[in-house]
Image: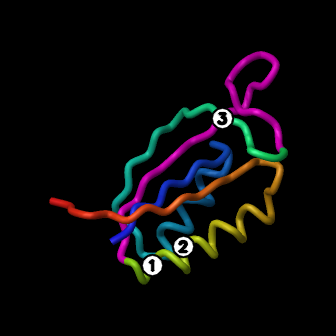
């Protein structure tokens, strides 16, 4: 099993939900308002007067076989909305209950 963490502009939430549905990923935890800025480019998302946009982040625990198609869908979304600064990370899950 793998943990997939995904952070993205909150304006993309409907598109992210659609990806999760299409990938058959039902369970996840979402943080509705997270701040951040990209490593290389893109505008900061701080929720301030100067930088008003905000990120949303989610964590989904998925089977190993689901990781590649999920990341491919996230990459496709990021390519279409590059300046929004989406990022995904994958970790091993040692145990779950």
Mark 3: which secondary structure?
Answer: loop
Between the C-alphas of marks 2 and 3, the distance is 22 Å
Between the C-alphas of marks 1 and 2, the distance is 6 Å
Identify the residue position indicated by label 2 in the image.
Answer: 70
Q: Are marks 1 and 2 in contact (CB under 8 Å)?
A: yes
Q: Residue at x 81, y 56 (%)?
A: 82
**Along the horizontal axis of the image, is 22 left or right of 82?**
left
Identify the residue position indicated by label 1 in the image.
Answer: 66
Between the C-alphas of marks 1 and 3, the distance is 27 Å
**Along the horizontal axis of the image, is 29 left or right of 20?**
left
Q: Is residue 82 above or below residue 48?
A: below
> Is 39 one of the magenta-colored residues?
no
Q: Is residue 67 above or below residue 60?
A: below
Q: Are marks 2 and 3 in contact (CB under 8 Å)?
A: no
Q: Please provide the residue range marked out in magenta.
A: 42-63
Image-quadrant location for residue 69 = bottom right
Mark 2: which secondary structure?
Answer: helix
Residue 96 percent location from the top left of the image: 20, 61
Colour scheme employed for the rendering of this structure: rainbow
Residue 54 percent location from the top left of the image: 66, 33
**Nearer to me, 91 or 47:** 91
Q: Residue furthest top?
A: 49
> Is 59 one of the magenta-colored residues?
yes
Mark 1: which secondary structure?
Answer: helix
Image-quadrant location for residue 36 = top right
């Amino acid at each position: 099993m793998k943990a997939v963490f995904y952070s993205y502009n909150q304006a993309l939430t409907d598109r992210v939900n659609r990806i999760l549905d299409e990938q058959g990923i039902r369970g996840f935890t979402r943080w509705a308002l997270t701040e951040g800025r990209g490593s290389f480019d893109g505008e900061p998302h701080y929720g301030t007067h100067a930088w008003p946009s905000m990120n949303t982040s989610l964590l989904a625990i998925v089977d190993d076989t689901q990781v590649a198609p999920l990341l491919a869908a996230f990459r496709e979304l990021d390519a279409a909305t590059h300046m929004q600064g989406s990022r995904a990370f994958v970790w091993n899950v040692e145990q779950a209950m």
